[in-house]
Image: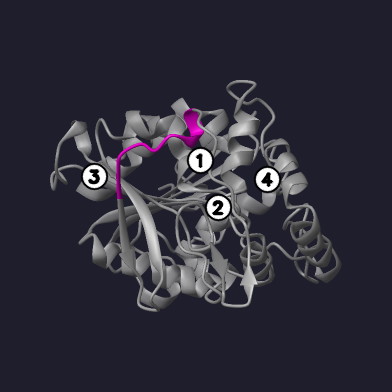
Amino acid sequence: LELGARHRVRCSEPAMGFMNVAIGTKRDFTTSDNVRLVYHELFAGGGSRHDPEAPTLVLIHGWSGTGRYFNMGLGELATACNVYVPDLRGHGQSDKPGYGYHIARLAADLRDLLAAAALDKVVVVGTSMGASIIWSYYELFGKARLAGAVFVDQAPLQNRAPDWRLGSNGCYDAASLAALQTRLRYDFEGFAEDNGRSCMQTPPNAEIFDELKAETLTCCPKALAQLMADHTQLDWRPTIQTLKHLPCIVMLGKKSQCFPWEGVQEVSRLQYSNEVQFAVPFEEGDHWLYIEFSSRFVELLKAFSSMAARDTQIPDVLRPYVAKANRS
């Protein structure tokens, strides 16, 4: 695999374990800037085609992950939902070109995916950096094709600023970014080894770290370095304040090693004009809530997507989490 004509990189093939097994049907499409991206699709109830009566979810993984990070809950999600799971450019099985590693381009890739798969009334789920991709999509394209949005453990700004101290615990200024980029260049395997342990406290089994490491090693380290340089300095607070008429749910890990939980909660507070939104704390949760607490994550997604896609009453499982700004 290549990152541009002059920078050849070696990206591993994933080892075979639960997290490294493809679930669903593999598809690909070409973006508007001529990049081939891979996604997997699963249809509601195990059907052979997209069920227009079922909610549709698009799961967007975070920086240095792949779509297979969601494997723990995919089978259960697909009992009730159509599920689409892409690998971002530079990640997993998707192409690794020498360009396009900024959040706005990834938002355009999301737009291209929705168009290529002819999806509408979609609930988009962004974990970590995936949340920033959704904020960028909303800023660029509004609510087009969307029924709802889920933001999982991502602060609205990673860097520190004079009025902001609730960003990333690991990458928050020029010096910490440079240190991370240096490690990606010279010790990518070591980075991949440590990545899972900085995002989980209670993995489902002892093998999970090795499987997740194998997935991270399918990503391109130079692409990751370029992407983080863009991602970490973007301030989404003004954009989040414009969210309206789009049901949203914020999930936060109270024991996240990546962000102070108060910084993630700010995503909910900033949506004071949004009519339907929820803030769900995972008291024992770290950054990768969808792996550590897969069953609860799936339960919440199924309930939220059904409500958002069908414009129905708030389900009982979500009522305790209605954001205070939206309580009548």
Find disc 1 in the rendering and name its residue. 69
Question: Which mark identifies residue 62?
Answer: 2
Q: Rounded to the nearest whole Å, what is the CA distance between mark 3 and mark 4?
A: 29 Å
Q: Rounded to the nearest whole Å, what is the CA distance between mark 1 and mark 3?
A: 21 Å
Between disc 3 and disc 4, whose residue precedes? 3
Between disc 1 and disc 3, whose residue precedes? 3
Instruction: Please indicate whether residue 94 sits to the left or right of residue 195 in the image.
Output: left
Q: Secondary structure at mark 4?
A: helix
Question: Which mark identifies residue 261?
Answer: 4
Between disc 2 and disc 1, whose residue precedes? 2
Asked if disc 2 and disc 1 are in contact, CB closer than 8 Å, the reply is yes
Q: Secondary structure at mark 3?
A: loop
Amino acid type at circle 1 is: Tyr
Amino acid type at circle 2 is: Gly
Q: Is residue 89 visible?
A: yes
Amino acid type at circle 3 is: Pro
Q: Residue at x 25, y 65 (%)?
A: 116
Question: Which mark identifies residue 251?
Answer: none
Q: Rounded to the nearest whole Å, what is the CA distance between mark 3 and mark 2?
A: 22 Å
Between disc 4 and disc 2, whose residue precedes? 2
Give, as a single range, the part of the protein colored magenta.
18-26
Q: Is residue 22 magenta?
A: yes
Amino acid type at circle 4 is: Trp
Between disc 1 and disc 4, whose residue precedes? 1
Instruction: Please indicate whether residue 211 sits to the left or right of residue 93 in the image.
Output: right
* Circle nearer the viewer, 3 or 4: 3
Q: Nearer the viewer, residue 18 or 261?
A: 18
Q: Secondary structure at mark 1?
A: helix
Question: Which mark identifies residue 55?
Answer: 3
